[in-house]
Image (cartoon, rainbow, N blue to C red):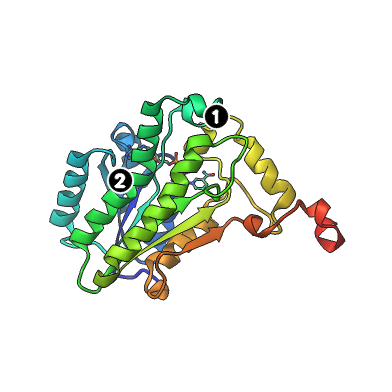
């Protein structure tokens, strides 16, 4: 499905990362994969990925690192067909507690890392994509239009990310570059485990998702990311695809739904 494609996968931290699952899936589907990791993680990520992957360190909130990422890919490959944005961060005081008392500095870093960097990555892809176009995919948690007991400013960042993705779709469509998000169900990654009371989310899925959902298996999300990176999705842009076991479509828990759903 991705034979001959040159793909950048950002956001690998550990072998639990959605980005890790995507890098492995994309490679197995024939892609050449460049991996980027937060600079602090680059040595451990090189060890994790082995020789089949190029690994580069980049802080996606920093213009200099984005330039270096661009130049490194350009000198190695000369072009880029697609990228996964799998990057988010918010300081702890922006993820839980008193929403209204969150320091503005925490909100700013969360927004820059989790929403603005998607547009920054779109710029890198725009400059490197071949005339046939490209595909950018980001990762949402389906929180953008609802308030949860936790998640706080990250929920706001995800709402912003949804909007950014649509503006990217608007501006890069003429160049054949697509922009789509995958809204994943909860997965026990390093970022997720930094969210206080993350188990509230996995418990919500346990009671409500119509399909069984495993918070330790990122492969269903990775597979859909690969689809969106591929030419099979060539007419899809500005879209948000849920890969969450159907949780988003349910109004009540399975037991409240009654009938065979509640069995
Ligand atoms: N885990 C979940 O339940 C879940 C659900 C839906 C969406 N997501 C989203 O998936 C994406 C990937 O997260 P994950 O759950 O795989 O966790 P993860 O911790 O494995 O990945 C998050 C990555 O963001 C990177 N990062 C943070 N700040 C950065 C910066 N300034 N520059 C570059 N990289 C930076 C981290 O180093 C890490 O590699 C995030 O956007 C997250 O919000 C996660």
The reply to whether discs 1 and 2 touch (Cβ–Cβ < 8 Å) is no
- Image height of 133 relative to 45, above or below: below
Query: Quarter of the picture for ligand 1?
Result: top left
Q: At numbered mark 2, what does the secondary structure look like: helix, strand or loop?
A: strand
> Which of pointers 1 and 2 lies earlier in the amino acid sequence?
2
Residue 40 rendering spot, x and y as whole percentages: 31, 31
The residue identified by callout 1 is: 96
Q: Is mark 2 within 8 Å of ligand 1?
A: yes
Q: Residue furthest front?
A: 100
Between residue 69 and residue 99, name the one nearer to us.
99
Residue 145 rendering spot, x and y as whole percentages: 55, 49
- Identify the image quadrant of residue 238: bottom left
Res 88 label: none
Q: At numbered mark 1, what does the secondary structure look like: helix, strand or loop?
A: loop
Q: Is residue 155 left or right of residue 133?
A: right
Between residue 27 and residue 87, name the one nearer to us.
87
Question: In this rendering, which labeled residue sits more in front, label 1 or label 2?
Answer: 1
Q: Is residue 42 left or right of residue 262?
A: left
The residue identified by callout 2 is: 36
Quadrant position of the C terminus in the picture:
bottom right
Crowding at dot 1, Cα within 10 Å, few <14 / some 14-19 / many 20+, comes out as some
Residue drawn where x is 53% and y is 51% of the image: 218
State the CA–CA distance, disc 1 to disc 2.
28 Å
Residue drawn where x is 32% and y is 59% of the image: 168
The answer to whether residue 70 of the structure is visible from this angle is yes
Query: How many numbered marks have been drawn onto this rendered protein structure?
Result: 2
Residue drawn where x is 26% and y is 71% of the image: 174
Between residue 17 and residue 120, name the one nearer to us.
120
Quadrant position of the N terminus in the picture:
bottom left
Residue 8 rendering spot, x and y as whole percentages: 30, 55
Residue 190 rendering spot, x and y as whole percentages: 48, 36
The answer to whether residue 20 of the structure is visible from this angle is no
């Amino acid at each position: 499905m991705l034979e001959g494609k040159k793909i950048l996968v950002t956001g690998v931290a550990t072998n639990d990362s959605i980005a890790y699952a995507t890098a492995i899936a994309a490679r197995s589907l024939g892609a050449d994969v460049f991996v980027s990791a937060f600079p602090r993680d680059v040595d451990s990520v090189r060890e994790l990925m082995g020789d089949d992957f190029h690994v580069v360190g980049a802080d996606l909130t920093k213009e200099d690192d984005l330039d270096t990422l661009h130049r490194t890919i350009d000198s190695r490959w000369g072009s880029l067909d697609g990228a996964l944005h799998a990057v988010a961060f918010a300081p702890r005081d922006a993820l839980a507690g008193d929403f209204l008392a969150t320091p503005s500095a925490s909100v700013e870093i969360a927004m820059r890392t989790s929403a603005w960097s998607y547009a920054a990555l779109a710029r890198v892809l725009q400059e490197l994509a071949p005339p046939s176009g490209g595909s950018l995919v980001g990762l949402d948690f389906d929180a953008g239009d609802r308030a949860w007991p936790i998640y706080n400013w990250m929920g706001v960042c995800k709402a912003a990310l949804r909007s950014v993705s649509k503006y990217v779709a608007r501006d890069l469509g003429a160049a054949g570059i697509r922009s789509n998000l995958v809204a994943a169900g909860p997965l026990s990654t390093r970022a997720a485990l930094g969210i206080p009371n993350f188990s509230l989310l996995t418990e919500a899925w346990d009671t409500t998702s119509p399909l069984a959902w495993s918070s330790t298996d990122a492969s269903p999300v990775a597979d859909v990311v690969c689809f969106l990176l591929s030419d099979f999705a060539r007419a899809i842009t500005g879209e948000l695809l849920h890969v969450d076991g159907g949780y988003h479509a349910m109004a009540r828990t399975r037991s409240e739904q009654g009938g065979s759903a509640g069995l």
